[in-house]
Amino acid sequence: MYQLYIANKNYSSWSLRPWLLMRHLEIGFAEHLVPFGQESSWESYRKISPSGKVPCLIDGGSTVWDSLSIVEYLAERHAAVWPADSDARAWARSAAAEMHSGFTELRNRCPLSCGIRARLKETPAGLARDIGRIGVLWNDGLRRFGGPFLSGKLFTAVDAFFAPIAFRVQTYGLTLDAASAAYAARLLDLRSMREWYADGLKEKWRHEPHEAEVLQMGSVLDDLRQKESA
């Protein structure tokens, strides 16, 4: 069985992607959560992954790190990871790669924290461009391949790559066009997304660098998480 190592579900957008894909496609795996900020957590990650980061997938003697690499490794073994249609597959891979390497302003201005609701202090031009590009990209996929997911009728890796954006939309109240907002809501309503979210709310760990990032960018309106561990 695959062994998938992840970090806190409240914070770790990178961990969400392969976890969600595998859970939604019913690819069996054992979950190992190593929280941020615990004593020697970096050393714990180094024992798992050559990069010292998660997610990391272990399959027998193979260790696969980085979310995009994990997805491609799974795609070699499970046909449903990418769309069957070659045009849809090419588009989906391009969109996922753009998400993997881009949208820096959106990542920096809206750090992932699933269990809170926040208001941003400002929406600078770079963030507005990233949000606008999300809308253009999502609408392109939905129109071109007919929805309800980005590359067609079925949830695939490209949807998993954009799933953290849906949580950011929820957390920060980001404004999207109607079709994009409906797609984000569709992602949030997936059983596997609801499972991740519920687990994130139960976490009592707090990682101060993540908490500080949120406060730097905005103000917290509500915190739905369980109370912090003593």
Image: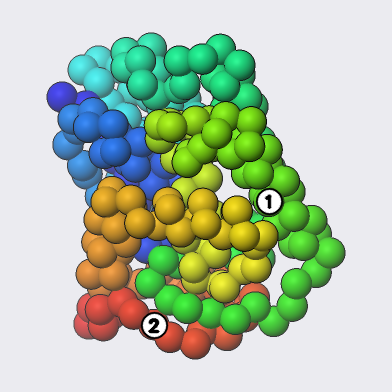
The residue pinned by badge 2 equals: 223
The residue pinned by badge 1 equals: 135
Give the quadrant of residue 21: top left
Residue 66 in view here? no
Quarter that holds the N terminus:
top left
Residue plotted at (65% across, 78% down): 120
Residue 58 - label: none
Percent x, y of residue 55 = 38, 39
In the orientation shown, which residue stands out farthest toward the right? 125
Dot 2 crowding, Cα within 10 Å, few <14, some 14–19, many 20+: some
Q: Amino acid at mark 2?
A: Asp
The foreground one among 88 and 201 is: 88
The foreground one among 77 and 150 is: 150
**Which color scheme is applied?**
rainbow
The foreground one among 44 and 145 is: 145
Percent x, y of residue 196 = 29, 55
Q: Residue 24 vs residue 146: left or right?
A: left
Quarter that holds the C terminus:
bottom left
Quick check: 185 above or below 208? above
Residue plotted at (60% across, 54% down): 180
Residue plotted at (25% across, 21% down): 59
Instruction: Tell which tag, 2 or 1, sits nearer the viewer.
Output: 1
Q: Amino acid at mark 1?
A: Gly
Q: How many marks?
A: 2
Residue 87 in view here? yes
Mark closer to the chain start, 2 or 1 = 1
